Amino acid sequence: MQTIAHRELRNNSAEILRGVQAGETYEVTNNGHVVARVTPVNLAPLEGIRHREPTDFESFGDIARVDPRVSVEDALDELRGDR
C-alpha cells in the first residue's frame, strides 16, 4: 500500500487510477494525516459468502420455541456457546 498526498492524487489521478485498476491500494493524506483509501472495487462482493440450503419446516409449529423469560442477551450467549 502506498501513501500519497491529496495533491498527488489531484495532479496524477489518471496514473493513480491505472494503479488501482492494476490492484494497487493508496492511502491519501491531508496535512500528514491519512483521510482516505483508494482501493480496487470488489466486483464479486458476494463471492466469499457461504450458502446453505434453507431449513424446511412443515409449519411454524415445528420451529423450536424459546422461553420468553430468557433475555435476548442470554439466548445469544447460549447460541454463541459462551457459557
Image (spheres, helix red, strand yellow):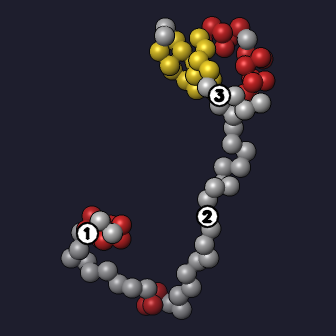
Q: Which mark is residue 50?
A: 2
Nearer the N terminus, badge 1 or badge 3? 3
Residue beneath the point at 73% across and 11% down: 12
Label 2 with label 3: CB-CB less than 8 Å: no
Is disc 3 surrounded by few (<14), some (14 to 19) or many (20+) residues within 10 Å? Answer: some
According to the picture, the residue beneath numbered tag 1 turns out to be 83
Horizontal side of 76 relative to 38 (left or right) equals left
Q: CA distance from mark 1 to mark 3?
A: 42 Å
Nearer the N terminus, badge 2 or badge 3? 3
Secondary structure at badge 3 equals loop
Secondary structure at badge 1 equals loop
**Residue 54, horizontal then vertical, whole percent:** 58, 77
Horizontal side of 70 relative to 60 (left or right) equals left
Above or below for 74 versus 33? below
**Residue 15, horizontal then vertical, whole percent:** 77, 17
Nearer to us: label 1 or label 2: 1
Secondary structure at badge 2 equals loop
Q: For the C terminus, give its image quadrant.
A: bottom left
